[in-house]
Amino acid sequence: MSITTKTGDDGTTALYGGKRVEKSDPRIEACGAIDELTSWLGLTVATMPNQEHREILIQTQRHLYSIMAILASGPGELSEVSKHLKSIEMVINDLETLLPKLNQFILPGGSELSARLHIARAVARRAERVSVLVLHQYMNYDKKTVPISLQYLNRLSDLLFLLARRYNTEEILAKTLQRKT
């Protein structure tokens, strides 16, 4: 089967179940942002030295596909996403204890790994914003019950921010030690 179907040449694409919608549909935009996020995570994982951090981001990539399925009007079971959210929160707590208190805004960048994490964080924030729109327009989102998908994207951006800080701090320390020797 060829990857080229030509069915999207008219500016439409299929949702889960086959319904065709414009490629500018917010559901497609949300899925596209999450797809972009999974790609940035893949690039980030490729150079991440810490096995635990690599593993949590690889698991995240898998769970993001479950969230995409739901946003594309598909069925979905998010119990594994909910469990993984607890793991993410534990890593966030660990990183917050290790990192110095932040008293100002920081510019994204620093080390290459930190810069990649900052890009992934920004894409996660966009995915979250568009997902809120999708949940309002298509899924009767009730603000009293925050969907796990929104919690997950929100926490993920926090994790990516803290990881970016950690790896930038680590690189600065390594360069300082090199200069002293």
Image: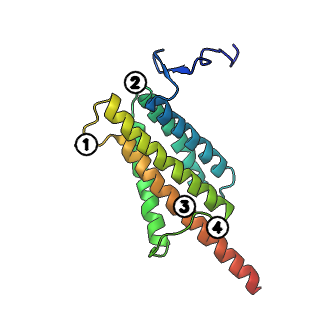
Task: Give the Cα distance between marks 4 and 2.
Answer: 41 Å
Residue that sits furthest to the front in the current view: 10
Residue 154: x %, y % from top left: 41, 50
Quarter of the image containing the C terminus? bottom right
Residue 6: x %, y % from top left: 65, 15
Q: Residue at x 66, y 70 (%)?
A: 171
Q: Residue at x 32, y 35 (%)?
A: 136
Q: Which mark is residue 143?
A: 1
Mark 4: which secondary structure?
Answer: loop
Counting other residues with Cα less than 10 Å from the Cα at mark 4, is it few (<14), some (14-19), or many (20 or more)? some
> Mark 1 or mark 4: which comes first in sequence?
4
Quickly name the residue at label 2.
75
Residue 112: x %, y % from top left: 68, 61
> Mark 4 or mark 2: which comes first in sequence?
2
> Mark 4 or mark 3: which comes first in sequence?
4
Q: Are marks 2 and 3 in contact (CB under 8 Å)?
A: no
Pick the front one: 57 or 155: 155
Mark 1: which secondary structure?
Answer: loop
Counting other residues with Cα less than 10 Å from the Cα at mark 2, is it few (<14), some (14-19), or many (20 or more)? few
Quickly name the residue at label 4.
110
Q: Residue at x 41, y 46 (%)?
A: 152
Residue 105: x %, y % from top left: 48, 70
Q: Which mark is residue 163?
A: 3
| Three-letter amino acid code at the position of disc 4 | Gly
> Mark 1 or mark 3: which comes first in sequence?
1
